[in-house]
Amino acid sequence: MINVKEFGVVGDNTTNNAGNIDSAINACSESGGGTVHFPAGRYISGTIHLKDNINIDISPGATIVFSPDDDNFDDLEELSYNPHADAETTYFAPSLFRLDGVENVCIKGGGTIDGNHLHRLGPKPIAVKQCKRITIKDVKVVNSPNYALSFIDSEDITIENSIIDNAFADGIDLDGCRYARILNCRVSSVDDAMCLKSSPAMGKPINCEHILITNSTFLTEYTAFKVGSETGPGNFFDIAMNNCTLGRKKSLKNHPGGITIASLDGAHIAGFAISNIIMNHIGTPISIKIVNRGRAQEVATPGIIEDILFNNIIALDALSGCSIEGHPNQRIHNISFDNIMIHPAINMLTQLEERVCIFTCKNAENVNAKNYQFILPSKEPRLIPIACLEDTENCFISMAENVGNINSRRRKSKKIKKQ
């Protein structure tokens, strides 16, 4: 174990320590690896470059803070190709902790990483590019101006018992990553709280697959759990999410999205299991859609969404029911809902006409919604629940206890008997 103070690092909230921190990491690396320890203090720093087999131990009394001088951070990477992706998704060099092609690295300890910003745009707190066996554990990241925890083309990732608070962009981004686990975390962000991507930022298709997200809370102004924004040319397979709570960022009045799964740029999305989810103060609880945007495609071609299961979902204070919308040239296939309970927002009910669309399904087939409940108050007997179906085949929607079944084949809409 190396104490950073042995290398002249000063926790005085003034000195830029980046160079001395790198010296401590280099010394630890030259000894074959080990732990670089930050005792209590507030350490200002620009980009810190991690190496193989290094543990960064930020003690509970320690905070590592972004330098206010942008010149203390690495410049943007020079790429030999057009990444066709958003800048925040593409660039990893301007960061506090830069992990580039390294293995066996852990950032842990119970301390804090402070992005030191009050707005979006700036370096990333932790940027991980083409790495293996990376662990983020027992840390808190606050005031992040960019994606707080940003991973691309990496594998064997563990993010555990960590907190992201007041992030001005995405909370956790996994872009083209494999074998990742997000456990016991809490994220509060302005943009997407938990986001999976398969962007063209690496100049080639890279799948996002074998991801487990469990026992975590995601709060946001935008979308709590999202597969979208940049979906293609890579694909998404084998994703599990369970035992999580989703909602809006504290003190907000707007209703963010709950779960969004979207193929925008040709991605094949398949093999998802999402269960035991509670949402509160959200807009659309579950939205699944195919959009033919065509980013990074020579010829815009719609993607594929199929084989997705939702089980035991509760959405409170919601603005709508669930929605499925395929593309006219590519239907969504094989979607299962079981035990879905939605309590609409009171102010939403007062604005409704007599017919209430509680489930929307368009350009889809083999959709089965069993025990689907949209709770309409008994004091509003004028409200009649309906499912809005268009260009669908073999879509079956049943209310709780088999009340008001719908079995559709290319139907526009159908009244459901009120519970």
Image (cartoon, rainbow, N blue to C red):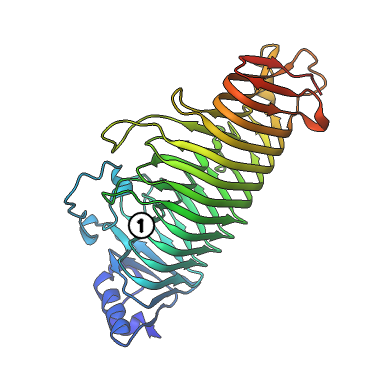
**Is 307 drawn above or below residue 2 in the view shown?**
above
Look at the image and tell me whether residue 80 can be seen: yes
The residue that appears at 29% across and 56% down in the rendered structure is 92
* Amino acid type shown at disc 1: Asp
Instruction: Indicate the position of residue 114 as horizontal and vertical percent values.
Output: 41, 59
Snapshot quadrant of residue 358: top right
Residue in the foreground of this view, choosing between 125 and 159? 159
Q: Quadrant of the N terminus?
A: bottom left
Residue 61 image offset from top left, x and y in percent: 48, 72
Residue 286 lies, with reference to residue 10, above or below; the image says: above
Position of 374 relative to 270 (above/below): above
The residue under label 1 is 153
Q: Is residue 221 visible?
A: no
Is residue 113 shown left or right of residue 69? right
> Looking at the image, which is closer to me, 416 or 6?
416
Q: Residue 416 location in percent, x, y?
A: 74, 19
Q: Residues within 10 Å of mark 1 (few under 14, many from 20)?
A: many
